[in-house]
Image (spheres, rainbow, N blue to C red):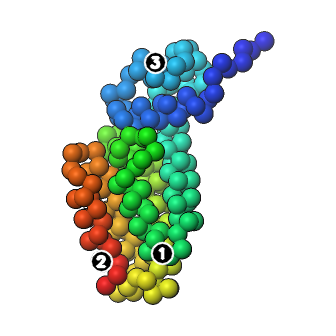
Amino acid sequence: MARSKEYDENAVLHKAMQLFWEQGYEKTSMADLVEHMGIHRRSLYDTFSDKHALFLKAMDRYGEIMDRNLETGIKKAETADQAIRFIFKYTIDKTDNTPTGCLFVNAAVELGARDAVTDAKAITGFAKEEQLLASIIQWGQQNDEFSTDYDAQDLAASMQNTLLGLRVLARTSISKEKLYDRAAIFMKILKK
């Protein structure tokens, strides 16, 4: 008879995600994972197969959380302008007790050039966010909140680049004020 798990798989996956997000893939050892997740090494292998498989599941978990958090904040916005400002605020101010930056950005920088599966997951995450941004920008253009001088998809790609840069800078000692200055420049582009 198989033993039942003595832990919540989603809870330990969340812990692994946070550790990979904070330390990166290479720096995170199996011993680190076992300690941080609070499970036995054998349980980790039985449930997640290996470190790489666990990392990919952690990336999926991260994507689900970001999608849910962004969707929740955007639904509260009454205007496209408010939705875009929420995304910048969420990116810069993160107050949900998670590491700074972005797991997809970290994974792409660390592993993208040599791990096709990780690269594909990061690119998919970026593309999904870009489509979300394009839909919000289109909403703003239709309501005369944003300029129509540029195509919504082009503006979304530019905003995506701005957000990626902000996520990298958020891991440094640059002040939030400077990060907000960069976001304000993009808002001016939208409004022209």
Which residue has dot 3 on it? Answer: 35
At 46% from the left and 60% from the top, the residue drawn is 129
Q: Is residue 139 above or below residue 15?
A: below
| Left or right placement of residue 177 versus residue 6 in this view | left
Distance, label 2 to label 3, CA atoms, is 47 Å
Name the residue type under label 1. Answer: Ala
**Helix, strand or loop at mark 2:** helix
Which residue has dot 1 on it? Answer: 80
Per the rendering, the mark at residue 116 is none
Q: Where's residue 1, x and y in %?
A: 78, 12
| Viewer-side label of 2, 3 | 2
Name the residue type under label 3. Answer: Glu
Name the residue type under label 2. Answer: Lys
Q: Name which of mark 2 and mark 3 comes first in the sequence.
A: 3
The residue carrying pointer 3 sits among few (fewer than 14), some (14 to 19) or many (20 or more) residues within 10 Å by Cα, namely few
Which residue has dot 2 on it? Answer: 188
The residue carrying pointer 1 sits among few (fewer than 14), some (14 to 19) or many (20 or more) residues within 10 Å by Cα, namely many
The residue carrying pointer 2 sits among few (fewer than 14), some (14 to 19) or many (20 or more) residues within 10 Å by Cα, namely few
Dividing the picture into quadrants, the one containing residue 173 is top left
Dividing the picture into quadrants, the one containing residue 48 is top right
Q: Is residue 13 above or below residue 102?
A: above
Q: Nearer the viewer, residue 49 or 180?
A: 180
At 28% from the left and 44% from the top, the residue drawn is 171
Distance, label 3 to label 1, CA atoms, is 44 Å
